[in-house]
Image: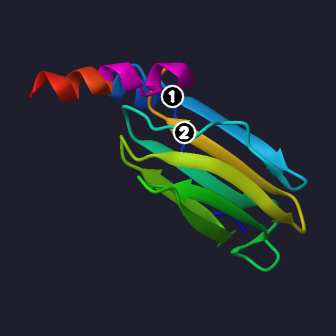
C-alpha cells in the first residue's frame, strides 16, 4: 500500500549542507496552454507529470504536448513521466491538450528561485562572439 519515496530531513541537510530548490506542483483540471514562453536554463531541470489517482496506472488521464530542442519538436505525453532536461535544452510551449481526469504537472530546479535559472540570451551571444 506504500512505497518508499524521497524525503529531505534535517539529517540530509546536516550531511549534505544547504539545499536550494525551486519546486512547484499544479493540479491540471482542464485543457490550456501554460504561460511560460519558449526558454532554456543554465542548469538542469526536471519536469514531471503525475496522475491524480492510481486507477489505470501509469495512464495520465490526459495528453500533454511540449516543444523540445532547437527546432521545438513536439513531444506528446499520455503517461506518468519525469522529463530530465539538461541545461541549455530549449523547451516550451506546453499544451494541456486533453484532460479526461485531473493530473499534476510541476518542475524542480536546484536553485533558490526559478528566475535565477533563466537563460540570459545576451550573455550567450556575448560568449559566442567572444571566441571569434
> 10 Å neighbourhood of mark 2: few (<14), some, or many (≥20)?
some
User: Residue 33 appears at what percent x and percent y?
Assistant: 77, 48
Q: Residue at x 74, y 43 (%)?
A: 34
Q: Is residue 103 magenta?
A: no
Q: Which residue of the protein is positioned furthest toward the bottom in this rendering?
A: 56
Q: Residue at x 59, y 47 (%)?
A: 92
Mark 1 or mark 2: whose residue is earlier in sequence: 1
In the image: residue 125, left or right of residue 98: left
Nearest the eye: 126 or 117: 126
User: Residue 49 appears at what percent x and percent y?
Assistant: 66, 57
In the image: residue 46, left or right of residue 51: left
Q: Residue at x 42, y 25 (%)?
A: 13
The answer, for residue 58, to whether it is visible in the render is: yes
Nearest the eye: 40 or 77: 40
Q: Does the magenta stretch mainly form a helix, a strand or a loop?
A: helix
Nearest the eye: 3 or 79: 79
Q: Residue at x 84, y 66 (%)?
A: 98
Mark 2 = which residue? 108
Quarter of the image with the N terminus is bottom right
User: Residue 50 appears at what percent x and percent y?
Assistant: 70, 59
User: Residue 16 appears at what percent x and percent y?
Assistant: 34, 28
* Residue 21: numbered disc: 1
Q: 63 above or below 118?
A: below
In the image: residue 74, left or right of residue 2: left
Secondary element type, mark 1: loop
Q: Are marks 1 and 2 in contact (CB under 8 Å)?
A: yes
**Magenta stretch?**
114-123
Secondary element type, mark 2: strand
C-alpha span from label 1 to label 2? 7 Å
Q: Which residue of the protein is positioned furthest toward the left in this rendering?
A: 132
Amino acid at each position: 500500500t506504500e512505497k518508499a519515496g524521497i524525503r529531505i530531513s534535517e539529517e540530509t541537510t546536516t550531511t549534505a549542507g544547504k539545499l536550494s530548490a525551486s519546486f512547484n506542483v499544479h493540479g491540471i483540471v482542464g485543457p490550456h496552454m501554460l504561460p511560460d514562453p519558449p526558454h532554456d536554463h543554465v542548469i538542469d531541470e526536471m519536469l514531471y507529470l503525475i496522475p491524480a489517482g492510481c486507477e489505470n496506472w501509469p495512464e495520465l488521464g490526459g495528453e500533454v504536448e511540449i516543444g523540445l530542442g532547437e527546432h521545438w519538436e513536439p513531444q506528446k505525453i499520455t503517461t506518468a513521466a519525469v522529463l530530465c532536461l539538461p541545461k541549455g535544452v530549449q523547451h516550451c510551449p506546453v499544451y494541456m491538450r486533453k484532460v479526461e481526469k485531473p493530473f499534476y504537472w510541476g518542475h524542480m530546479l536546484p536553485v533558490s528561485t526559478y528566475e535565477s535559472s533563466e537563460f540570459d540570451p545576451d550573455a550567450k551571444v556575448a560568449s559566442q562572439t567572444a571566441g571569434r
